[in-house]
Image (cartoon, grey):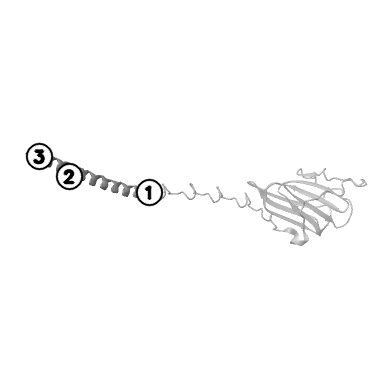
Amino acid sequence: MSRHPEVKWAQREDKVFITVVLADTKDAKVNLAPEGVFTFSAKAGQHEYDLKLELFDKVNVEESKINIGERSIFCILEKAEAKWWSKLLSGDAKTPHYVKVDWDKWADEDDDAGPADLDMGGMDFSKFGDMGGMGGMGMPGMGGMGMPGMGGMGMPGMGGMGMPGMGGMGMPNMDEFMGGDDEDTDEEGQETGATSKAAEAVSEEKTEGAAAAST
């Protein structure tokens, strides 16, 4: 079952401010009809949200603007006729509990100035008219976002790395070093054996000479 997001509103003589308070939305769709029908649907977390507002009077879709932020969707709706509305919604029904006054933007009709010029610095607005009513607009670059560019990342460039450049290394080139030592040892052994045989021959010659002298 879908839920209703919180909605805040305020107005000036020529426009209406509507803020849909919903963070981390996905697959958002926003529509605005000239008759003054505003619809919204999106997913957030494990829930689906939808909204339909039948506004007090008609609006100028071509001049109305929308900004999609990380925590809310902010709309500036241009009234078809510049006049103060007595309320946001048409009809005699009680205002839904999720529709509230946006006191940060509110100004009364008899205010000389009020916060007429809101600080919109840093907001990137798109016009409803340029987007064909914004139907099926979604949230560009954010749908199913999670953490973009990081899904399944683990540690990029390090997966299964072990110690890069050293995998299966053991002790590189050590066999060659050991082979050299073996050759040196064999040569030394051959030299030692030859010296021992020469000493034995000299000893035998001395023994034979001593035996001949005693005879």
Q: Position of residue 61 (x, y in %)?
A: 80, 59
192 is higher (above) or lower (below) than 82 = above
Q: Kindly indicate the quadrant of the structure image that contains residue 135.
A: bottom right
Badge number at residue 92 = none
211 is higher (above) or lower (below) than 176 = above
Residue visible at 15% across and 41% down? 206
Badge number at residue 177 = 1
Three-letter code for the amino acid on which mark 1 is drawn: Phe
Crowd rating for badge 3 (residues with CA inside 10 Å; few <14, some 14–19, many 20+): few
Q: Position of residue 197 (x, y in %)?
A: 20, 45
Badge 3 or badge 2: first in the primary sequence = 2
Crowd rating for badge 1 (residues with CA inside 10 Å; few <14, some 14–19, many 20+): few
Q: Secondary structure at mark 3?
A: helix
Q: Secondary structure at mark 1?
A: helix
Badge 3 or badge 1: first in the primary sequence = 1
Mark 3 vs mark 1, CA separation in Å: 55 Å
Question: Is residue 190 left or right of 69 when viewed as pictured?
Answer: left
Which residue occupies the foreground of this view, 181 or 114?
A: 181
Badge 1 or badge 2: first in the primary sequence = 1
